[in-house]
Image (cartoon, rainbow, N blue to C red):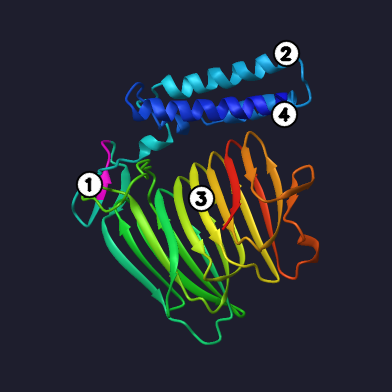
């Protein structure tokens, strides 16, 4: 085994093992540790960069030791009661009122909590040839698959924070901004369905008009995103996230379609049409990558067969740290 594959492999094993042990109750995993101990990942990345070209046994053991000690602190540490930025906010998850202002013991103002359902619409105008959708805010499940005769529509469930929608026109571009505000909490229970009475996950389900060309930008923290864009003309897609899960199905590319993914500790799966001409540029640190049906043209560059002669092309640029990146075909 090549030495440069050992560290990413060990990290993935530790992450998977910790999640399995937590799910079956053998350990109690404190997710808040990621908030307080995130610099550990900088240390791990720095050590691996310094010794990237050192293949000696002692260098490998040093890198392994840093990874194991770091994960030991994250998995078995308990920092829930330490003072920090997050102590400025007081969450009340069981409040059934529509709105509330929480106030801490020191008279400080807490998070405004909105609970309920909302619908947002933007009418379609015939001259809308190019539209830009900007999505921001974490602690949310984002879904997109269906079309609408509106330019844009969204239906939401809000349990923490609130969604805001604004729209402007910049030259000939219709700009739509959708933002989650005042949600500083995390809900890691993203598996399974989200229809139960006890589920408290913020969700936003979008529908887009298939006629314009779309530029879609997502900037979020702890987020689960499931977008099926096969029915839409996508000029560009940019995904930026921290502890996120991105699952995206793309349609046929335009003359040029750009997909940019910038993440931290995320799980990213991009699915493209079987016949799409696609080029991938990968700039990753401690990441696992799998690109099905691609030929490696040079270090960190991959292409589908016949890419250079194709009329319409998709360019995927991936960068991230401790992440899993997969590109497959349908």
Q: CA distance from mark 1 to mark 4?
A: 45 Å
User: Which label lies toward us, 1 or 4?
Assistant: 1
Q: Position of residue 8 (x, y in %)?
A: 62, 30
Residue to which mark 4 is pinned: 49
Packing grade of label 3 (10 A; few <14, some 14-19, many >=20) is many
Q: Residue at x 66, y 36 (%)?
A: 285
The quarter holding residue 307 reads bottom right
Magenta segment, prevailing SS (helix, strand or loop): strand
Q: CA distance from mark 4 to mark 3?
A: 27 Å
Using the image, determine if residue 226 lies above or below residue 176.
above
Quadrant (top left, top right, bottom left, bottom right) of the N terminus: top right
Packing grade of label 1 (10 A; few <14, some 14-19, many >=20) is few
Precedes in sequence: disc 1 or disc 3: 1
Residue to which mark 2 is pinned: 57
Q: Please give the label number shown on residue 271.
A: none
The quarter holding residue 277 reads bottom right
């Amino acid at each position: 085994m090549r030495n440069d594959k050992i560290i990413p492999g060990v990290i993935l094993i530790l992450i998977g093992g910790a999640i399995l042990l937590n799910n079956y109750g053998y350990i109690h995993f404190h997710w808040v540790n990621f908030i307080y101990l995130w610099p550990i990942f900088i240390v791990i990345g720095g050590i691996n960069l310094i010794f990237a070209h050192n293949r000696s046994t002692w260098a490998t053991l040093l890198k392994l030791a840093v990874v194991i000690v770091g994960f030991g602190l994250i998995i078995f540490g308990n920092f829930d009661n330490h003072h920090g930025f997050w102590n400025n906010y007081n969450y009340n998850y069981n409040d059934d009122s529509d709105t509330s202002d929480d106030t801490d013991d020191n008279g400080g103002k807490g998070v405004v909590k909105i609970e309920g359902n909302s619908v947002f619409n933007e009418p379609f105008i015939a001259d809308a040839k190019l539209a830009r959708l900007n999505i921001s805010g974490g602690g949310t499940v984002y879904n997109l698959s269906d079309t609408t005769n509106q330019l844009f529509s969204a239906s939401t469930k809000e349990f923490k924070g609130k969604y805001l929608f604004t729209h402007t026109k910049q030259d000939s571009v219709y700009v739509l901004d959708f933002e989650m505000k005042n949600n500083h909490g995390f809900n890691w229970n993203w598996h399974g369905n989200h229809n139960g009475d006890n589920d408290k996950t913020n969700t936003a389900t979008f529908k887009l008009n298939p006629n314009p060309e779309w530029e879609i930008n997502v900037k979020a923290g702890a987020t689960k995103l499931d977008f099926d864009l096969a029915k839409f003309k996508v000029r560009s897609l940019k995904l930026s996230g921290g502890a996120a899960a991105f699952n995206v199905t793309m349609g046929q590319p335009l003359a040029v379609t750009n997909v940019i993914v910038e993440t931290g500790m995320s799980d990213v799966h991009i699915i493209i049409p079987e016949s799409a001409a696609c080029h991938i540029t990968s700039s990753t640190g401690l990441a696992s990558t799998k690109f099905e049906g691609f030929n490696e043209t040079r270090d960190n560059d991959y292409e589908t067969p016949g890419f250079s002669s194709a009329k319409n092309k998709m360019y995927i640029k991936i960068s991230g740290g401790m992440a899993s990146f997969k590109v497959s075909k349908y």
